Amino acid sequence: MSTSKHAMLFQLSLIALSLAGVVAASAPTRTHLQFYMHDIVTPSPGTQATVARVARGTTPLPTAPTTNFGDMYAIDDPLTEGPDAASRAVGRAQGFYLFASQTELALLLSINMVFTAGPHNGSTVAVLARDLIPADVRELPVVGGTGAFRGVTGYGLLRTHFHNVSAHNAVLRIDMYLSV
Ligand SMILES: *[C@@H]1O[C@H](CO)[C@@H](O)[C@H](O)[C@H]1NC(C)=O
Ligand SMILES: *[C@@H]1O[C@H](CO)[C@@H](O)[C@H](O)[C@H]1NC(C)=O
C-alpha cells in the first residue's frame, strides 16, 4: 500500500469518526415547557406591580393616538406553573417591552425567562419577539439560552389567558418548544 493510500484511509477513518460524533451529538433533547406569566400594572391590595414605565412616547401621534407608540416598560413578572398567581413559582420573566407600532397594539418583547425551580433552576431562555396583543396566538422566537439551555433553539407560543382591560393586568400562557 502506498503512503498516499495510507494517508487517504486515515483521513477517511477520521471523517467516519467525526461523522459518528455528529450523529451522536445531533439527537437533540426536545422539551415542552408550559407556564403562566403574571403582568401586573395595577396592583390590588397585597400584591405589587411587576411593571415600571421607563419611557413615554410623544403621544398622541396624529397617525395613531391609541397604540401607545414609544412607551416602554421594564418588567420582572413572576412565572408560575398554573394560571393562579398562587400556584408554584417556576421563574421570572425579566426584560422590557416597547410599544413598537404606530398603527397596531404591538410590542417588541425582549425578555429572559429565568427559571428558579425544578430541573431548569438557574437556566435562562432569551426571547426576542413581536407581540401583537389582540392576536390569539403570538409566536416567540427563542434567540438563545444559558445553563441547561446553552445553545438552545426553538420557539414559544404566547396566549392571553386573562386580561383586565381597565387595570391593564394580564395572565399570559406560554408554551415553549425547545431543543438543546
Ligand atoms: C434553585 O437554585 C438555587 C441556587 O442553586 C438554590 O438556592 C435554590 O434553593 C433553588 N430553588 C429551588 C426551588 O430548587
Ligand atoms: C379589573 O380591574 C379593576 C380596576 O383595578 C377592578 O376593580 C376589577 O375588579 C378587575 N376585574 C377583574 C375581573 O379582576
Image (cartoon, grey):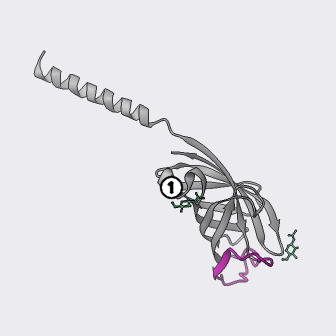
In this rendering, position of residue 60 left or right of residue 96: right
In this rendering, position of residue 7 left or right of residue 109: left
* Residue 28 percent location from the top left of the image: 51, 39
Q: Which is nearer the eye, 150 or 55? A: 150
Rendered position, 51 above or below 82: below
In this rendering, position of residue 173 left or right of residue 26: right
Magenta residue span: 42-68
Residue 24 falls in which quadrant of the image?
A: top left
Q: Is residue 134 visible?
A: yes
Residue for point 72% across, 66% down: 38
Residue for point 73% across, 83% down: 60
* Residue 27 percent location from the top left of the image: 49, 35
* Residue 2 percent location from the top left of the image: 11, 18
Q: Residue furthest top?
A: 1
Q: Residues within 10 Å of mark 1 (few under 14, many from 20)?
A: some
- Residue underneath mark 1: 144
Q: Is residue 71 visible?
A: no
Rendered position, 176 above or below 44: above
Q: Amino acid at mark 1?
A: Gly
- Secondary structure mostly seen in the magenta stretch: loop
Rendered position, 107 above or below 176: below
